[in-house]
């Protein structure tokens, strides 16, 4: 039996859902590794929306796995009914944007630092990959994978039914501008704190991070600023053809997925982190006087949406490249 390429994401999503659903049932029956609740090293249960759950919640995980598998398989059937799509997108959003929390972004952001630390002799306070990627955070990556597979299956089902697109080059340029501008407020606060300037916070708050915490914040801010520079490539020529200063690649076509995949993944993790801060803000966890510590992050969902939009616009523009139309040919 030959599986159509357009159906592969759906079958992959179904296999993922059955496996994860079985894992949920195992947790409910007492197997170790339940990633939420008391076994999650979340200091005060404020990060994950599932912090209140116990292993018995695994039955709900199993039920969601069965629903997801059924939805994925329904996307492979030839039918004009749109019900599978209406189910697929909310489930994908739940897996990609709701279940994960801000620790997913922290793990991604600190991984390069942990990789470079041995070469420079940095101790990083004894932090290791196990600290950045404990099982509850790795589990978030597993959930994101399942959601992306289901989203890919839904896109494959919808492909061919398009009647035009909202993702135009003009909207792509606007989205890039937003994606570059939004993180600058966060960057400004963290750079200021590293320099001893209490931008958006009190002197007492600033003193709490003098043990190196604000240097870590400045690192994350710089990471975000560099990401903004790379985002410009989604509308610049150097995002389509490697610049001359890159040995061995100069003048060659940039593979679209080399830009789309990182941009798409980053859009997910910053949206998830931003939603965590929005949830905390709504819950009244922050003081208006300390706005610098939380307000910039509340705009991250806008940053993530803009980056995702820019990536989709870039992909749609680049997918029509042919040997005769590629730049530099």
Image (cartoon, rainbow, N blue to C red):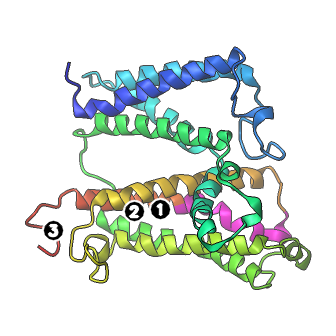
Local secondary structure at mark 2? helix
Q: Label 3 vs label 2: CA separation?
A: 20 Å
Would residue 20 be found to the left or right of residue 230 on screen? right
Q: Which of the two discs, 1 and 3, sits closer to the camera?
A: 3
Residue position for label 2 = 310
Image x and y of residue 263, in percent: 44, 59
Say if mark 1 contacts mark 2, CB within 8 Å: yes
Residue position for label 3 = 326
Is residue 289 within the magenta segment? Answer: yes
Residue position for label 1 = 306
Q: Quadrant of the N terminus?
A: top left
- Toward the top, the furthest residue is 29
Q: Label 1 vs label 2: CA separation?
A: 6 Å
Which region of the structure is painted magenta?
287-303
Task: Give the image quarter of residue 186.
Answer: bottom right
Would residue 140 be found to the left or right of residue 312 on screen? right
Q: Quadrant of the C terminus?
A: bottom left
Residue beneath the point at 42% across and 30% down: 13
Q: Label 1 vs label 3: CA separation?
A: 26 Å
Dominant secondary-structure state across the stretch colored magenta = helix
- Vertical position of residue 164 compared to residue 72: above or below: below
């Amino acid at each position: 039996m030959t599986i159509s390429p357009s159906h592969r994401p759906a079958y992959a999503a179904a296999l993922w859902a059955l496996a994860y659903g079985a894992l949920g049932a195992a947790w409910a029956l007492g197997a170790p590794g339940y990633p939420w609740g008391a076994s999650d090293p979340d200091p005060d249960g404020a990060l994950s929306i599932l912090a209140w759950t116990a292993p018995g919640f695994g039955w709900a995980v199993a039920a969601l796995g069965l629903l997801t598998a059924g939805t994925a398989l329904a996307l492979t059937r030839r039918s004009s009914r749109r019900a599978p799509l209406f189910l697929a997108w909310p489930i994908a959003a739940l897996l990609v944007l709701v279940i994960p929390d801000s620790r997913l972004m922290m793990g991604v952001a600190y991984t390069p630092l942990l990789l470079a630390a041995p070469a420079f002799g940095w101790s990083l306070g004894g932090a290791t990959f196990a600290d950045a990627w404990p099982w509850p955070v790795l589990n978030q990556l597993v959930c994101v994978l399942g959601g992306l597979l289901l989203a890919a299956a839904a896109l494959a089902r919808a492909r061919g039914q398009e009647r035009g697109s909202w993702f135009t080059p003009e909207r792509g340029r606007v989205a890039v501008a937003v994606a570059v501008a939004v993180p600058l407020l966060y960057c400004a606060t963290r750079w200021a704190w590293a320099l001893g300037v209490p931008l958006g916070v009190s002197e007492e708050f600033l003193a709490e991070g003098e043990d190196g915490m604000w240097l870590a914040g400045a690192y994350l801010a710089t990471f975000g600023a560099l990401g903004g520079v790379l985002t410009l490539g989604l509308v610049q020529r150097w995002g389509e053809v490697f610049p001359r200063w890159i040995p061995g690649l100069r003048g060659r076509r940039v593979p679209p997925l080399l830009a789309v995949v990182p941009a798409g993944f980053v859009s997910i993790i910053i949206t998830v982190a931003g939603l965590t801060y929005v949830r905390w803000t709504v819950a009244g966890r922050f003081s208006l006087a300390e706005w610098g510590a939380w307000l910039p992050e509340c705009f991250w969902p806008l940053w993530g949406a803009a980056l995702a939009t820019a990536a989709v616009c870039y992909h749609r523009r680049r997918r029509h490249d042919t040997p005769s139309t590629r730049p530099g040919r």
